[in-house]
């Protein structure tokens, strides 16, 4: 009973701060899209979503999953990995700069209004994602309240910037540039607080670069999938439809965004223990029930707050809400495979590749044969990804464990043959 009480107190004390940290980016983008749609128009809101997607794609070369490697090693007591991994990410980001300049040149040639925003964003790529690793250091150290304050302040500032600039007559493109620049500058200010991590040291595990590259490269295609559905909607329909789809997905994912931050407070536990099958089953049933209940209640939110989007957006959000259970256990399985101290990094790497292959094929079929159900089926790709993660993670873990058990037996047999 004492252990359960301690666990409950730890969760209640830290989970709200972790939730606030995670909700801030999504809520800020959600509010910003509504501000742009209100003060400009739906097309400008759709353009903002495209801008974020392009910047996100260029940031793929920043080795985004390196942040997980930072947590993995800091939990083991190796804080000296921070500086080399930060520089490693910045060097790789230069590829994104070159590609961004190429994209902006193409957009200028096509007289696309996004061209100047992408040009400026290209130069911020080495700063934007790598400098956000202050969040992972705070997570590994258990500083959840500080993380919440820093992140909430940053994204509130960006949303207020949108409201101010668009109200006084600046264009949405001006805001895109100002918002991203503000994001990067605040990141650098925050990162400057961690001077102890910038002390040069060659005493760090050398495999960090290999693990960073493998996990990030295998995860990059899945980050691509995070934006692929938006590009498909824009291609198959129009920017107005994209804006409605984005609002629907963002509404549904406001609930899903509660899962990952809640689990971040258990990283230290996940580094020592793996979740059991019973724990995973209970989590799936409980979180599915929560998701369906919220999905039913969200109907009134759309009817009262967003009546113009109800008919198209509500069914899409319902699909996302109803997938809460599979999303929760999928994330738990992925985190466990990365942070468990005796685990092998090959498990999440192989799982990432399988997830991209299966989900990518699913989206390709939808692109080839679009229809009236396309938006709903694209929304269903979100729970599909986590289902693939859950089952492939388990499969590869068992397969690698079996190989590890067979290796000594094979080696013993080979030695016996040599002796004979």
Image (cartoon, rainbow, N blue to C red):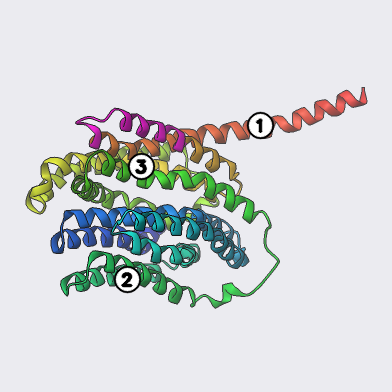
Residues at circles 2 and 1 in contact by the CB criterion of under 8 Å: no
Residue 81 in which image quadrant: bottom right
Residues at circles 3 and 1 in contact by the CB criterion of under 8 Å: no
Q: Is residue 176 left or right of residue 337?
A: left
User: Is residue 309 a member of the stretch shown in magenta?
Assistant: no
SS for dot 1:
helix
**Residue 19 visible here:** no
Residue bearing mark 3: 327
Q: Quadrant of the C terminus?
A: top right
Tell me the distance, in whole angstroms, between the alpha carbons under discs 2 and 3. 34 Å
Q: Is residue 223 left or right of residue 307?
A: right
Determine whether 6 is above or below 184 in the image. Answer: above
Residue bearing mark 2: 178
Residue 5 in which image quadrant: bottom left
Residue at point 22%, 29% (across, down): 371
Residue bearing mark 1: 403
């Amino acid at each position: 009973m004492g252990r359960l009480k301690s666990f409950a107190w730890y969760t209640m004390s830290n989970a709200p701060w972790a939730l606030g940290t995670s909700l801030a980016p999504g809520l800020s983008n959600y509010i910003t899209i509504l501000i742009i749609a209100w003060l400009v128009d739906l097309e400008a809101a759709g353009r903002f979503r495209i801008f974020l997607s392009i910047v996100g794609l260029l940031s793929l070369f920043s080795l985004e999953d390196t942040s997980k490697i930072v947590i993995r090693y800091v939990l083991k007591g190796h804080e000296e990995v921070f500086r080399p991994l930060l520089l490693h990410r910045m060097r790789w980001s230069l590829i994104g700069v070159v590609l961004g300049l190429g994209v902006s040149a193409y957009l200028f040639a096509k007289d696309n209004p996004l061209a100047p925003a992408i040009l400026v964003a290209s130069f911020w790529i080495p700063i934007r994602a790598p400098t956000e690793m202050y969040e992972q250091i705070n997570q590994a150290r258990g500083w959840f309240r500080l993380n919440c304050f820093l992140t909430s302040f940053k994204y509130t500032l960006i949303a207020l910037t949108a409201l101010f600039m668009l109200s006084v007559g600046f264009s949405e493109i001006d805001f895109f540039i100002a918002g991203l620049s503000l994001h990067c500058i605040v990141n650098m200010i925050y990162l400057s607080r961690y001077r102890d991590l910038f002390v040069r040291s060659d005493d760090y595990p050398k495999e960090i670069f290999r693990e960073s590259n493998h996990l990030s490269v295998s995860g990059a295609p899945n980050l691509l999938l995070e934006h692929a559905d938006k590009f498909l909607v824009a291609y198959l329909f129009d920017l107005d439809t994209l804006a409605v789809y984005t609002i629907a997905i963002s509404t549904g994912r406001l609930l899903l965004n509660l899962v990952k931050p809640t689990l971040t407070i258990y990283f230290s536990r996940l580094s020592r223990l793996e979740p059991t099958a019973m724990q995973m089953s209970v989590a799936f049933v409980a979180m599915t029930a929560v998701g369906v209940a919220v999905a039913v209640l969200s109907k009134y939110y759309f009817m009262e707050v967003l009546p113009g989007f109800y008919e198209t957006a509500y069914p899409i959000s319902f699909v996302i809400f109803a997938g809460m259970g599979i999303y929760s256990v999928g994330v738990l399985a992925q985190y466990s495979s990365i942070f468990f101290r005796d685990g092998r990094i090959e498990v999440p790497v192989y799982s990432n590749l399988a997830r991209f292959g299966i989900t990518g094929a699913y989206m390709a079929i939808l692109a080839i044969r679009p229809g009236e159900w396309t938006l709903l089926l694209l929304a269903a790709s979100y729970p599909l990804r986590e289902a693939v993660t859950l089952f492939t993670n388990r499969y590869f873990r068992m397969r690698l464990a079996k190989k590890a058990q067979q290796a000594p037996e094979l080696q013993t047999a080979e030695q016996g043959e040599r002796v004979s």
